[in-house]
Every structure is written in structure tokens, then in C-alpha cells.
């Protein structure tokens, strides 16, 4: 089906590589390599916007990456594919994606991974330029001293040596837009969003003859909510997945004390406070960095054995917490005794604003901090403010200059989709997607799940994720990994390298014959 | 916790007043344009507008009116298996357009129930030409699914 894609042979002017240009299944007549490619369509992320129609065109460029002495020749394909209704076959949306595919690989055995960020309303720029693509931005996380805008460098921890990588933007973000009679808003709900992603995945696989390839999903944050629903929808549609990577999960909004008002227990965040207190040397005694995993183990036990029953009694019957527990919490989290006394069901918003007098610590990466009132703190989260502008400036330049894709629209990193998102799912006002993940596993008991977590992420705390996934029961399919770092663990150089090795192992296990 | 709510004032449907923008019928236009650039346009001169951020909020986040949801059970064990079965059954029932309690291969295909289509012969052990939900469950259990 690749003939349906009008691949424009926009190749880097490297004589050695020209042989690969202009093919793309377009009938055997190589198009002359063009130095640039312009998609003239204006894309909008407005709620009511839609395209009258869409064509599937992409800029195709050839690249090389040398990872630890091994040269990897890959093709980057940047453009649009049309998702069509699973049963109606009617055009739904024109998805913008950038695919990195290893040259000369066997499609039957070469994995393909679909990456997307969350929001909802976020483009996939964070994963695309920060995680395991062939290029990454040098953020210096968790320091805030790296030169900005961040330089874009070859990524020694790219997953391109393990899997083909497809970074795709949700409808109404980046350069993805609905096709009439749909509008962007049509796909701004939990179920409609996952369904249109399913249809994109099916289209990508069909257009590139990848139906037999091992398939993986890699979602972050709300992208993990999407992954659970999407995995079940794909399995139901007969598209069997090998693996799902959950980067910093929010699988059940109904128990997320950091997102909904703290009317539910914040126990899922308590071990994270332990890690953050230790980072700032505020715990008594403060665990050595090498002792962090063991210390976190103690925090889990403290939370389950003592905090859980105490906070339940506090929330339901107003029973004051035992003073000894308050002291213990103060000693193990860095939050003052007074803080625990006034906020026993301690939510991340209070913690990040009050841990250190005069400073605001990050929510996405609590290791990042800035003086209250300073430019980095003024938007409410220093760890986001430090990186936003660099990611915004990098994506357009990268698409233009490296992938030779130009377009008259602005690439929208974060759209307003979140403000009018339909969060309802399975009869509840807010999504609980553990049943979706369980249903995906019922469809496909071979499916493997890897949960990637940052110790210092206050928005999707790792212990809550552990508890959510534990609802699945003891399963060999589900693995959890923990790293130094925040929501985007991959921004930390050490953690990115460790996670890359874990991912490679996970892919090996998920693609091995049963 | 409210994630950077200060900058958020986005009523639903705020895009309604958006001015219309030119849309190109691009089927031929895109190709013609690319052919037209020939080799004279360098990547350095072709520039897209800068990327933008329309909102200051990032994930995960929910609007204020959703922050006090009613208590919602978090099923596990038998309750979770029941909910999974309910989800599977809903998909099956959507394909069972004749309300016969069984689904044919064509009905499964028409409903997008690809996993039934793909494994139809394994599910339809009686060679009846139609499968019941119990047949589907038996098949899934046989592959290792945790279903009651």
C-alpha cells in the first residue's frame, strides 16, 4: 500500500545516500532529489477547525547515526497520514508524524514503536526531541545552568538500534487536524482520541507494509491513559501488540490526588516526598544516594502500614493523626512537622510550594528549584519553564533544516484541547483505564507492559502507579522500573542511559518467541 | 493541586470566532509546488513559522469542575475480571446486529472486531459459522486470559 503515499524524494544532498531517495514505492521512477519540501496546507489546532480533505505526503530524508562505533543508516519520514474510521472507512483526521526507520531491515522482525505525549492537548515534541529519537536536546536536567536554547545532538541512547520509531501528534496538536465533517473537538475525548489513534496506527502499518512487525506503544503521562484504552482497541481490532511502555503513568484519574482536589488519599505521593526530601538533604537521617532504593522501600512500608490507615481515619472521621507518625513523616520527607500537622493529606501542590522556604520546587521534576518570584518560578513549575522555550524553538528548526519539512503553520506544542476535553470513560466522569489494560491483556496474554517511573516526579507519583498496576494481580507481563528524575526521566543523562538498556531488554523479551 | 491554572481561561468552543483561513485543495498543489521548487530553494531559505504554546497547562490536568468526582470504585480481582468481561461483551454485542447471541465472521468484520475475524476458525470449534460470547471467552481463556 505504500504506493498510496506520495513520497517526495527530499534527501540530504549526500551523494552516497541519494540511491535511497525518491523510491518509496512510487512506481520505480525515482523523483529527482529536492532540497526541500513544503506542505502548503495550513493546520489549525482550534476546537472547531477541520481540513476539507487531506493527502498523504511526506518529506523523506536519509541520515546516519553512530552509536558506540556502530553506524546506523536510517530514513526520516515527516508528513501526514489519514486515519479512517475502522468500520466506516471515512476520513477522520490527518495525523502529523515523524518516523525513523532503519534502512535495510526486515519488516517482519523489525519492531515499530508509536510514541505520543499526553496533556491531553500536548504534541509529542517532548518525547520526540527529548527521549529516544535519533536526536535529543541537551537540557542538563536537573540543573538549570545549561545554555539555552538547548543544542540538538546525536542521541547515543536512541532506541533506533532496537526499533523503528514513529512520533505522532494527537489531533488538534502539533500539525495534526481533523478532516471534515469532523472537527478537532470531535476527537477531544478519552474514547474518540484513542479510537482515532487506533485508526492512525492501522493506517501507518498498512501504508508501510508493517502489519507483521512487532508493535509497541510508548505513551507518556496522559499518553499512558491513552495507551491503556488504545491497546485494548487495537487488540479488539485484531492488531496484536508486543509491548506497551508506560512513561510516568496516570492510569486512574479518580485516585490522582495531585490532579483532582485532595479529597482522595495522597498516600501514592508519600514515597516521592521521601525521595525529594533526600534530594535536598532534608531527611533525618538523610539516605545516601546509593541507599535511595532501599529507603524508598521503607517509605512504601511506612505508607502502607501507617499512613494509609491514619489518613483514612482522618479523611472519613476527622481523627487526628498519631503525633509519632507526624514526626516520622517530617523526618522522612523533609516537609516540616507544622506542614504535616496542617496538611496531613499532603498534596503535591502544597509540598512543592512549602518544602523549602522562599523556593519553589518543580512538579514535573522536583529536583529543579528556583527562588519564588524568579523568572523560572513565575509560571509555577521551574522544571517546565526551563525547558519549554528550547523545545518550542527546536522543533521548527529541526523539521525545516534536518528533515526538510516546511509548512506555513505554527507547530503547536500545547493546544487548548485540555480545557474542553471529554474525560468521561466507562460510565465515570474521570477515566480509570486499568480495566482497559486488563482487557488488552485478556485479548492478548502475551502482551508485555513496562512501567517507567521517576522518583522525583510529583505529578504522576510512582507509588500510585504501582498501586494502580497491582490491581491487575500478580502478572509476569508487567514490569516496573524506577529512575532518578522527574516526569521526563529521559532528560536525566544517567537515567536515560539506564532506561535505554532496560528498554532494549524489554523489547528483547517482548519480541522473543513464546 | 492545580497545575499552573493562572493562565487558563479557555471556554469551550473558544475557537468559534476564529477567522477563516485559506485552505488549499492540495492534491495537486503539493506535488506541483515540490516539483516547482526544483533545486534552487535551499533548506536554509525554507522556514516554517515558529512553534507556539497555546496554553500554560501541561499534563495531567483536569478542569476545575471535574476535580471533585463522586467516589469511583477501583475494581480489582473478581470485580476487575467482571468489568473486563463486560467490556468484551459490549464489543461482541455491537457486532451481534441480529441479536441472535452469535456473530458470524462477516458480522465481526463489519463491526471491526478484528480479533474474532482473525481467530474465527479457532473460536468456532463446532464449525457452526457463528460464534457465541462463551466461545470467545473459552478461546481467550485457552490462550491464558484471566477471565472467569
Image (spheres, coloured by chain):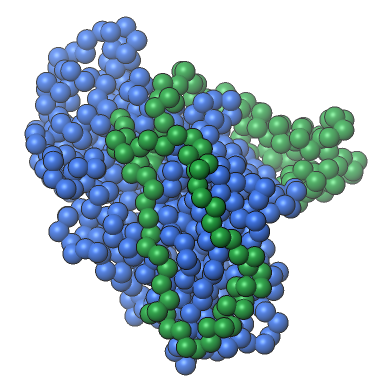
Residues B10 and A314: in front is B10
Q: Going by the picture, which residue comes out furthest to the bottom?
A: A15
Question: Is the residue A400 above or below the residue B52 in the image?
Answer: below
Q: Residue at x 16, y 48 (%)?
A: A375
The reply, left or right, for residue B79 in relation to residue B95 is left
The reply, left or right, for residue B99 in relation to residue A233 is right
Q: Residue at x 32, y 6 (%)?
A: A317
Total labels drawn: 0
Where residue A333 sits: x, y (%)?
A: 17, 32
| Quarter of the figure with the N terminus of chain B | top left
The hue in which chain A appears in the rendered picture of the protein: blue
Where residue B120 sits: x, y (%)?
A: 80, 47
| Quarter of the figure with the C terminus of chain B | top right
Q: Going by the picture, which residue comes out furthest to the right?
A: B128
The reply, left or right, for residue A189 in relation to residue B120 is left
Quadrant location of residue B35? bottom right
Q: Residue at x 67, y 79 (%)?
A: A26
Residues A50 and A228: in front is A50
Where residue B99 sits: x, y (%)?
A: 85, 29
Question: Is the residue A112 above or below the residue A481 in the image?
Answer: below
Residues A15 and A472: in front is A15
Residue A330 seen in render: yes
Q: Residue at x 70, y 82 (%)?
A: A27
The hue in which chain B appears in the rendered picture of the protein: green
Question: Is the residue A127 above or below the residue A285 in the image?
Answer: below
The reply, left or right, for residue A306 in relation to residue A358 is right
Quadrant location of residue A276? top left
Amino acid at each position: 500500500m505504500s504506493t498510496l503515499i506520495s513520497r517526495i524524494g527530499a534527501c540530504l544532498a549526500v551523494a552516497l545516500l541519494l540511491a535511497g531517495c525518491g523510491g518509496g514505492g512510487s512506481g520505480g521512477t525515482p523523483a529527482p532529489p529536492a532540497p526541500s519540501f513544503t506542505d502548503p496546507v495550513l493546520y489549525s489546532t482550534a476546537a472547531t477547525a477541520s481540513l476539507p480533505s487531506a493527502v498523504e505526503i511526506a518529506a523523506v530524508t536519509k541520515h546516519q547515526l553512530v552509536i558506540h562505533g556502530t553506524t546506523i543508516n536510517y530514513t526520516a519520514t515527516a508528513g501526514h497520514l489519514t486515519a479512517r474510521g475502522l468500520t466506516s472507512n471515512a476520513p477522520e483526521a490527518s495525523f502529523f508524524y515523524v518516523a525513523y526507520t532503519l534502512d535495510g531491515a526486515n519488516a517482519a522482525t523489525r519492531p515499530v514503536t508509536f510514541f505520543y505525549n499526553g496533556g491531553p492537548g500536548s504534541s509529542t515534541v517532548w518525547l520526540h526531541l527529548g527521549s529516544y529519537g535519533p536526536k535529543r536536546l541537551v537540557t542538563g536536567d536537573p540543573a538549570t545552568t545549561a545554555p539555552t536554547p538547548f543544542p540538538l545532538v546525536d542521541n547515543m541512547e536512541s532506541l533506533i538500534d532496537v526499533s523503528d520509531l514513529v512520533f505522532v501528534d494527537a489531533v488538534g496538536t502539533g500539525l495534526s487536524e481533523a478532516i471534515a465533517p469532523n472537527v478537532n473537538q470531535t476527537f477531544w475525548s478519552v474514547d474518540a482520541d484513542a479510537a482515532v489513534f487506533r485508526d492512525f496506527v492501522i493506517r501507518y502499518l498498512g501504508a508501510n507494509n508493517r502489519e507483521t512487525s512487532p508493535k509497541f506503544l510508548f505513551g507518556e503521562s496522559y499518553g499512558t491513559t491513552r495507551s491503556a484504552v488504545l491497546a485494548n482497541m487495537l487488540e479488539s481490532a485484531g492488531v496484536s501488540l508486543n509491548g506497551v511502555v508506560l512513561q510516568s503513568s496516570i492510569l486512574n484519574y479518580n485516585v490522582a490526588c495531585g490532579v483532582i482536589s485532595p479529597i482522595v488519599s495522597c498516600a501514592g505521593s508519600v514515597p516521592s516526598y521521601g525521595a525529594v526530601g533526600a534530594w535536598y538533604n532534608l531527611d533525618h537521617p538523610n539516605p545516601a544516594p546509593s541507599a535511595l532504593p532501599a529507603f524508598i522501600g521503607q517509605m512504601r512500608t511506612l505508607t502502607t502500614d501507617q499512613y494509609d490507615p491514619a489518613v483514612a481515619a482522618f479523611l472519613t472521621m476527622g481523627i487526628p493523626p498519631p503525633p509519632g507518625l507526624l514526626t516520622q513523616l517530617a523526618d522522612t520527607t523533609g516537609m516540616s512537622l507544622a506542614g504535616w500537622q496542617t496538611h496531613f493529606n499532603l498534596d503535591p501542590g502544597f509540598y512543592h510550594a512549602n518544602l523549602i522556604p522562599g523556593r519553589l520546587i518543580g512538579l514535573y521534576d522536583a529536583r529543579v528549584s528556583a527562588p519564588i518570584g524568579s523568572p523560572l518560578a513565575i509560571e509555577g513549575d521551574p522544571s517546565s519553564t526551563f525547558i519549554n522555550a528550547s523545545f518550542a524553538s527546536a522543533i521548527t528548526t529541526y523539521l525545516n533544516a534536518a528533515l526538510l519539512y516546511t509548512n506555513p503553520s505554527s507547530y503547536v506544542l500545547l493546544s487548548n484541547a485540555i480545557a474542553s476535553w471529554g474525560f468521561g470513560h466507562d460510565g465515570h466522569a474521570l477515566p480509570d483505564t486499568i480495566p482497559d489494560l486488563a482487557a488488552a491483556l485478556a485479548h492478548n496474554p502475551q502482551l508485555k507492559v513496562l512501567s517507567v517511573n521517576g522518583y522525583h516526579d510529583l505529578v504522576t507519583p510512582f507509588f500510585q502507579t504501582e498501586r494502580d498496576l497491582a490491581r491487575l494481580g500478580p502478572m509476569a507481563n508487567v514490569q516496573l522500573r524506577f529512575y532518578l528524575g522527574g516526569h521526563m526521566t529521559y532528560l536525566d543523562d544517567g537515567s536515560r542511559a539506564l532506561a535505554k538498556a532496560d528498554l532494549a531488554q524489554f523489547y528483547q523479551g517482548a519480541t522473543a518467541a513464546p | 493541586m492545580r497545575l499552573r491554572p493562572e493562565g487558563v481561561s479557555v471556554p469551550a468552543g473558544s475557537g468559534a470566532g476564529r477567522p477563516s483561513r485559506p485552505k488549499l485543495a492540495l492534491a495537486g498543489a503539493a506535488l506541483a509546488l515540490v516539483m516547482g521548487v526544483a533545486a534552487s530553494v535551499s533548506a536554509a531559505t525554507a522556514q516554517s513559522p515558529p512553534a507556539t504554546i497555546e496554553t500554560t497547562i501541561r499534563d495531567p490536568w483536569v478542569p476545575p469542575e471535574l476535580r471533585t468526582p463522586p467516589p469511583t470504585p477501583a475494581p480489582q480481582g473478581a470485580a476487575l475480571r467482571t468489568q473486563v468481561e463486560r467490556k468484551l461483551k459490549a464489543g461482541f454485542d455491537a457486532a451481534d446486529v441480529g441479536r441472535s447471541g452469535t456473530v458470524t465472521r462477516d458480522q465481526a468484520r463489519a463491526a471491526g472486531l478484528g480479533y474474532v475475524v482473525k481467530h474465527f476458525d479457532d473460536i468456532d470449534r463446532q464449525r457452526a459459522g457463528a460464534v457465541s460470547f462463551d466461545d470467545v471467552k473459552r478461546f481467550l481463556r485457552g490462550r491464558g486470559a484471566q477471565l472467569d
